[in-house]
Image (cartoon, rainbow, N blue to C red):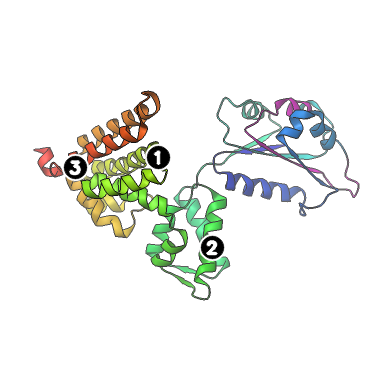
Amino acid sequence: MALIYGPNQGLVRERARIIAQSIVEDLSDPFRVSSFSSSELKAEPTQLVDTATAYAMTGGRRLIRVESGTDDITASLRLAIDTRDVEGFVVIEGGDLNPRSPVRKLCEGEDCIGVIACYADDEAALSEVINQVAAEHKLRIGRDARAFLLQQLGADRGSTRGEMEKLALMVGDNTEVSLQDAIASVGDNAALSIDEIVFSVADGDLASLDRQLTRALNEGTAPVTLIRAAMRHFQRLHQAAAKMAQGQSSDQAVKSLRPPILFLHVNRVKRQLDRWAPERLADALVALTDTELACKTTGLPAEAVCGRALISLARAAGRGSRRAASR
């Protein structure tokens, strides 16, 4: 029995399929493969053990696939675990299960169950997926295009593969993938708009911030999403600033960040580092954390709380350079 779970549902499905095909190569075989949803197992908990103990009519080991999401199916699992003559192999596709999840706690406590967690792909794993799809379609991906893809993709393995397949289809017979191709195919307008808001804050560009912020909120972007995006950016600036405090140049510090800064933004980030001393970046992160909490707990309009905080930070950025702040 195996439980595969986590926020990266594309990777959950991919790993579950690999395990399943190691048991039954043809997953459409009706005699050896059975599937259950969590609602079916909750309604009749004995279905799982009944199927797992049955022999396949055509011979070979049976495979039972369970799509459980985050539902509690421990009653059904416990029956299967306590039954000694289980012939079939059970693969459970779980959702984003926290440590208190009954299903996760049960499976992690049993030696007979393998448990695999699937989180967002790191740079190495994402790069491997990009290389795989590129090789399948005989694509050559330019350095700048690759940097953009590494920045835009990775949260979900299934979405990553889908976006790469779409890119391959878009470039067609042109096997060289440029940055423009990557932006046209994979670029998320909403995500790019959020990036511009965050950069406007760190730049101290109030006019651009007002314009982009109004547009994003009118289009329904959640204020907390904007605050968290700003936190991620300021965390990266803080990392680079710490390296500069240790003697690295701004160029070295920016190049060390992972995933890499898109080359179009490198000079902009270096200018931001000149504006923000490490202690001011730390203060900005505290302010953003407090703002997220205020959005969730004070009862005040989250749009107003978010806007006030971002404008305040943009004004702070415009009050002087990093060198001036350090004097």
Q: In the rendering, at what x and y percent does residue 14 appear? A: 63, 49
The answer to if 196 sits in the magenta stretch is no
Q: Earlier in the sequence, mark 3 or mark 1?
A: 1
In the rendered structure, which amino acid carries the disc numbered 2? Lys
Asked if the residue under mark 1 is in contact with the one under mark 3, i.e. CB atoms within 8 Å, the reply is no
Q: Position of residue 55 (x, y in %)?
A: 88, 41
- The residue where tag 3 is placed is 317
In the rendered view, would you say 15 is above or below 309? below
> Outermost residue, bottom direction?
173
Please tell me which of labels 2 and 3 falls first in the chain. Answer: 2
Label 2, label 3: how many angstroms apart (C-alpha)?
39 Å
Can you see residue 249?
no
Q: In the structure shown, which secondary structural element does the residue marked by tag 1 occupy? A: helix
Q: At numbered mark 2, what does the secondary structure look like: helix, strand or loop?
A: helix
Looking at the picture, tell me which residue is in the foreground, 14 or 41. Answer: 41
- Dot 2, how many residues are within 10 Å of its Cα: few (below 14), some (14-19), or many (20+)? some
Q: Which mark is residue 225?
A: 1
Residue 76 at least partly seen: yes
Q: Nearer the viewer, residue 13 or 254?
A: 13
Q: Quadrant of the C terminus?
A: top left
Residue hosting label 2: 166
